Image: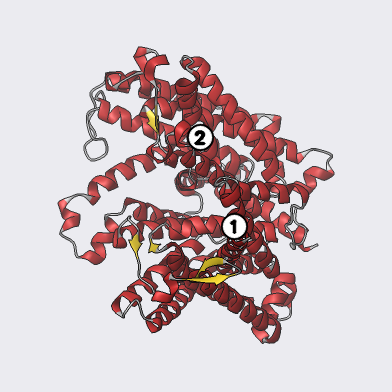
Amino acid sequence: MTAAVAAARRIPVPLVVGVGLVILMACLPLLNISVPGVLPTPTYQPGTLALLSLAMIFAALALSYNMLLGTAGMLSFGHALYFGAGAYGLGIGLENLGVPLWPGVFVALIGGLVIALVTGAVSMRVSGIPFAMVTLAFAQAGSVLVRRNSSVTGGEEGLSLNTAGVPDWLVGVVNTRNLYWATLAVLLVVYLVSVWVDRSRLGHLARATRENELRVRVLGLEPSRARLLVFVIAALCASLVGVAYMLLQSGTVPRSVSADLTITVLVIVVLGGVGYRWGAIVGGVVYTILDQRLTVLAGSDMIESLPSVLRVPLSEPLFILGALFILVVMFLPGGIAGTVDSWMSRRRAGSAHGDAEMSDDAPAGRIEGAEQVLETAGQEARS
Amino acid sequence: MSTLVLVLLTGIGLGALYFLVASGLSLIYGLMHVLNFAHGAFLTLGAFMGFEVARRLDSTSWWAFAVSILVGGLVGAGVAALTELALIRPLYERHIEQVLVTVGLAFAAVALYEGIWGSDPIYIQAPAWMRETTGVLGAQVPNTYWVLMAAATALLISLVVFLRYTRFGTIIRAGVENRAMVTALGIDVRTAFLLVFAIGGSAAGVGGVLAAHYTGYVSAHLGSTLLIFAFIVTVIGGLGSLPGAAIASVMVAVLQQFANYYLGGTGDIIVVVALAGVLLVRPSGLLGRRFA
């Protein structure tokens, strides 16, 4: 939060690495790289491109969720609602309104925005844990609506994309490459929005609110508006990711509105490291690839030959991911990014003593901050 | 008239089921400020264990039913106590992490149940009387609803007696009121934490067995759906308030049943709208104390 951080941000090393990574990712469909055990096929083939695109979808969704949990310290269980609004919004726009792709995207985003504004404004009547419960209830209502109105949303069957209005270069397995690039662009947009939010006055206000809401109020600032704005921006990003998901998968199922998906995203953000943008991306990629690999592993002969005490848990990828998540929360509070970051700053601390303490990316700071918001809420409740 | 009575009574019965889940959630939140996402997993485990026990005995007999209730309660209490000791206690006072751990547990547990019992619902058997109906004012009310009401009433009475007339109950009530003061008086609140978790877990376990009889089947996702309604009930009733949870359970369930019957199956949506309404008018819930 201080000059040290501002100075650190001016160092272009992360920028160089980031631009390099984006260029590398953009070139992947043109290269023939095989990573056995991690990627199913060489990188230019649709199998791997689809997997990587899905990983980027999750990374972008995790980034948008990180704006809520990392920046504003809001534990929401309803983030899937806005993702689903994007996906279903596009699907319904194309199917029922018969509009071409771009107006369809616009309709989907507007839909996501309106839903986010209404549900956000109501849920922000409470904060902390009650906020988590209320957002969950809204997402559940959305999920029920989607499952019930099968004539519009396809119900349990899901809604498939009506490709009549979609340009040819975005349709079909042949064009997985183009979809991959489109997804990369969406990830980039969400990342840039996330950077902008974190650096803007809005982000500062949201972080300050996370740390101590009362003090922000005493300073004459309006914490609730900043929070709502961050909430809506994050939701809008989620809707955009939902649109990309709909195009990528050429369809969507009710699971994309469910609490399950939000919990998946929460797992990704915590695995990656709450409050770290690159952590959310790493988490998304690691989660997707792990999920895919564990599913392959679950069906393998090695697992089949184990006694049932070991076979049953090991053949459930979600069980392993859940257990991994518990272990990370208990023993690795900063997640992947936090652990790497504190390891780096400990190494740096040898040369420049004291820098580590100054960094606002200090591993524990983020989640403790969020907790402090809860504590404040608790104290007010007691007073 | 008879329809009205039927909808009302089934609403109260459903509310009783909500209360079995919500009471534990509300107590745990009131004392420890922990939102227990794994509560649904306790419930599901109770249901599966009750089912397994009843299946091995004679599942249409009354004593098998009684044993399955007992087993459900014990399993729920046991697994909840273990959760508190192994997962919640090491993260003392770190509320967000505590929530995350219970989320992870719920996530892993549902996957494990699917691995063991499969993802399809398993239909269960019950004593013949449970499948029948009883006529009240011309309405034929299924007997499971009476069992639910009896169980919830018994739970409410025993909780009130326990909280009011025992030493641990006093500590828990004092802890909800002002935990810092209780600790300052030299009382180890951690025992109370464990106890509250065990009580909540056993209520959920019993609730699981009864929920299985209510729906007619057990499945790995039995708890997840109920948990969301239990959350809504605890927020509407006021977090940490037991009477609030009781009143809100019945109100929410009756509203839900009426909307399902008279407004074309819109019950779930109406409940969420009611939640939004309560939050706009009274953010702290019906009987809750003020929170930001």
Give the CA distance from mark 2 to mark 1: 23 Å
Q: Is residue B292 left or right of residue A269?
A: right
Q: Residue B87 appears at what percent x and percent y?
A: 49, 66
- The three-letter amino acid code for the residue at tag 1 is Phe
Does residue A89 sit above or below A145 in this rendering?
A: above
Asked if residue B95 can be seen in this view, the reply is no
Quick one: B211 or B24, which is closer to the camera?
B211
Which of B107/A69 is in front?
B107
Q: Quadrant of the C terminus of chain A?
A: bottom right
- Residue drawn at x 58%, y 34% is A235
Q: Residue at x 62, y 45 (%)?
A: A74
Decide: marks 2, 1 in contact (CB < 8 A)?
Answer: no
Quadrant of image for the N terminus of chain A: top right
Number of marks? 2
Q: Is disc 1 on the same chain as disc 2?
A: no
Where is mark 1, residue-wise? B231
Query: Please, which chain is the residue tagged with disc 1 on?
Result: B
Dot 2, how many residues are within 10 Å of its Cα: few (below 14), some (14-19), or many (20+)?
A: many
- Residue ID for mark 2: A83
Please indicate, yes or no, whether residue B218 appears anywhere in the rendered image.
yes
Residue A332 position within the rendered picture, expressed as x and y whole percent measured from the top left: 47, 54
Q: Residues within 10 Å of mark 1 (few under 14, many from 20)?
A: many
For mark 2, name the chain.
A
Image position, residue A268 (x, y; %)? 45, 44
Q: Amino acid at mark 2?
A: Phe
B174 left or right of B35?
Answer: right
Q: Position of residue B51 (x, y in %)?
A: 36, 71
- Taking B234 as reference, is A86 left or right? left
Helix, strand or loop for disc 2: helix
Q: Indicate the secondary structure of the residue bearing disc 1.
A: helix
